[in-house]
Image (cartoon, rainbow, N blue to C red):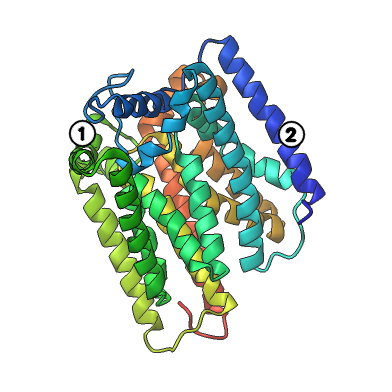
Amino acid sequence: MEIDRSIKYFIFISLLLFTAILIVEKINGRFWLNDFKVFYEAAKALLANEKVYGIPFGLETGFYKYSPFTLLFFIPFTLIPYNIASIIDFILIASATISTIVLLVQIIRKNNGLPSPPKTITYLLILLCVINHLVRELHLGNTNMILLLLLTLSIKLALESKYISSSALLAITILTKPYFLICLLPYLLIKKYKSIVYVFVWLLAFVIVSGAAIGFEKSFSLYSEWILAMKEHSTYLSSNHTFFALLSFYIGVKIPSSFGIIILGIIGILSFAYLWLKNGKNQIEVSKNFEQVFLLYYFILIALIPSILITDTEHFLFSLPLIVLLFLKVKQENKFAYTIFFIVLMFLYGGNSSDLLGKSLAGKVEDWGLLGIGNLIIIFVVIYFLGRHNKGAQRNII
């Protein structure tokens, strides 16, 4: 399939931008990729039959916290020197970012009735919306954009009724970060029970594969240690941007961070119950309109994760799908008030840079948790859009 010219230009300009970021990081001696170093060193430890979990690889908080299966993907990197491997990882993150933006624009345009093909500037402005978090993602060498690409490909395949391959990709993300189990709720809503079964079959298959590769006794020990590592993860992290942190800062209501995963599950179940009850009176088929609800519910749940669980700020890249949707809608409406609102919202979400605001003001913006506020507003605006859309639908979908 021939690539649209605007996409070609976007890829070219983006590659120039990422190359510039790489060069600047190298010149300033900041090409660290500390998170990737953790993956790299943990993979080396696995090969050397050394301890993988509970060991700080580099920074004090540089603990490997993903599954043994996920670690298998990093073993090939250990065959080459770290300096070269880190550059390859940087390229993979950049490529995943470009691919994800292009895919999201295509998927959301198709399922939201946006017929006009976007120009290069559309893709670039979307990239600009997340550039602050993306620079940090590249600086750390994290996996968020790669995981978001897998999640996007998974939903794309699901919309094309390719549920087996879709489930395989989703299973990989779940074995990397188990909180993505929440992504099964949209499938349950549309009664695609086979897809859910496929996910668990793939999960079992991947665990068996890792057991065969590592050794089943060693693998069992590693999976036990992984569960403990996930439990301890939030104990050495802090965030001013979760819903709980905002409640504490602005209202004085304190909720233990350990409740995060429970609250995320409760929100997922309640939202599912609401949608299920609304649809219970109708025999729903997967119409084009319902595909939109399925898509938005999927992306809303993903965007909600960093607002509930304590994570690093680059995890707010999970809101990229919702930002693409809002950007395309604002562009379609072409109203000055909407444009100004979107710009302000993007400042809250991704405008906290010490280079732009200065160190003192940037510190205050961090303390105020404006990123967390911005992310919640993004989610609520999309929920409002979803409800407004379906009020005008011929069928009572939601």
Residue at 34% from the left image edge and 49% from the top image edge: 209
Residue at 29% from the left image edge and 36% from the top image edge: 65
Q: In this view, does 59 lie above or below 296?
A: above
Quadrant of the rendering where the C terminus is positioned: bottom left
Depth check: 19 or 131 in front? 19
- The residue that label 1 is drawn on is 235
Residue located farthest toward the right when viewing the structure as drawn:
5
Q: In this view, does 179 lie above or below 146?
A: below
- The residue that label 2 is drawn on is 13
In percent of width and height, residue 21 lies at 61, 23
In percent of width and height, residue 160 lies at 58, 69
Q: Badge 2: how crowded within 10 Å, few (<14), some, or many (20+)?
A: some
Q: Is residue 261 left or right of residue 129?
A: left
Q: Which numbered marker is on residue 15?
A: none
Residue 141 in view of the camera: no
C-alpha separation, residue under disc 1 versus residue under disc 2: 41 Å
Residue at 56% from the left image edge and 50% from the top image edge: 323
Instruction: Describe the element under mark 1 as helix, strand or loop.
Output: helix
Depth check: 252 or 243 in front? 243
Q: Which callout, 1 or 2, points at the residue further toward the start of the chain?
A: 2
Q: Badge 1: how crowded within 10 Å, few (<14), some, or many (20+)?
A: few
